[in-house]
Image: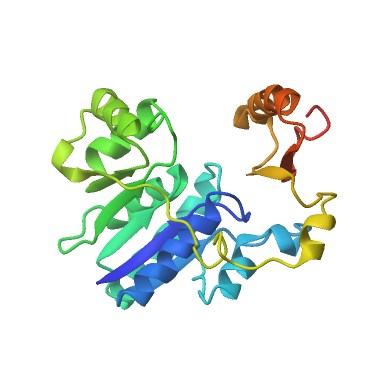
Amino acid sequence: MHILHLLSNSKWTERAEPVADLAVAQRTLGCAIDFACGRLRPGQPPDRAAEPRARQKGLDPVGLELDKHLDPRSMVRDIPRLRALLVERRIEVVHAHMENAHLLAALAVRGRRARPLVVRSSYEPDGPPGGWRPRLLHRYGTDGLVLISEGARRAALARFRFPAERMAVIEPGIDLGVFDPARPLERGDRASFGLADGQFVLGVLSRLRADRRVDLIIRAALTVARRYPHFRLLICGHGEGEPEL
C-alpha cells in the first residue's frame, strides 16, 4: 500500500511529531510512504520547523506549500502539484491530518476515475469542529475518519452523520523508544531540572497557550503538593501563554 501523509503546518508541534512517527511506523510495517508538510518560512527558527525535524526521522518531505491557514493562492499552486504526485507515485491513500490538508486532498482527487482514498485524522477530544466547510468535506471528500476517543466518535456521528462503518477510534501512538520507564537516566538529568532524588515528578509537555488549559494542571498540582511535599510538577513547552502561566 502506498500512503501519502499531508500535514498542513510548517511548525514542529504536538500534531506534527505523531504524524511523522505514524509514517515511519507504517513504513516499518512494509507500506510505501510519502510525507508532505508546510515549508520552512523566512525567519522561522529551524529548530521549530517541521521539515528538518521530519528529515531527522528519515522522511523526505515532498514539495508542497501546505499552508496551515486557508490561502487560495497557495491552494491553486498546490493542487496541480499534488495531482501530478498522485499519478507519478501511484498513491493509494491520502491521509490528511489538518483541515487545509483535508481540503487540498479532496480537491486534488475530485473527478479522477481511479482515485486514491482520502482518510482524515481528527485529533480534537470533542471530535471534528462544525461549520460549513468541515460538513462539506466530511460528506463529499472523506472515505475514512480516524478519531482519538469514543467520545469524539459519537460527536462526529451526531455532527456530520458520517457512516459509522467508515470510522475508527485509534489513540495516538507513543514512541516507546523515548518514553520508556525502564530506560536508565543519568543522575544529572534530574539535577539539571532542579529535582532531587526521592521527589515524585509529574511531567507535562504542551504548547503554552490558553486553550491547552495548563492552568487546570497547575491548580490540581497545588492541591496535591499541599498533601505530599515531595511532589513536583515539571512543565516543558513554550508559547504565547507562558507569561500568564
As displayed, is residue 208 above or below residue 237? above
Towards the viewer: 30 or 37? 30
Query: Would residue 212 be seen by someone viewing this image from the given angle?
Result: yes
Instruction: Name the image quarter holding the N terminus.
Output: bottom left
What is the quadrant of residue 232 in the picture? top right
As displayed, is residue 107 above or below residue 116? above
What is the quadrant of residue 202 in the picture? top right
- 143 vs 170, left or right, is left
Question: Percent x, y for residue 170?
Answer: 32, 48
Question: Percent x, y for residue 240?
Answer: 76, 36
Instruction: Name the image quarter holding the C terminus.
Output: top right
Question: Percent x, y for residue 55?
Answer: 58, 74
- 67 vs 42, left or right, is left
| Residue at 29% in and 24% down | 159
Question: Percent x, y for residue 188?
Answer: 82, 64
Towards the viewer: 30 or 38? 30
* Color style of the picture: rainbow
Count numbered badges in the picture.
Answer: 0
| Residue at 69% in and 44% down | 201
| Residue at 27% in and 28% down | 154
Towards the viewer: 192 or 167? 192
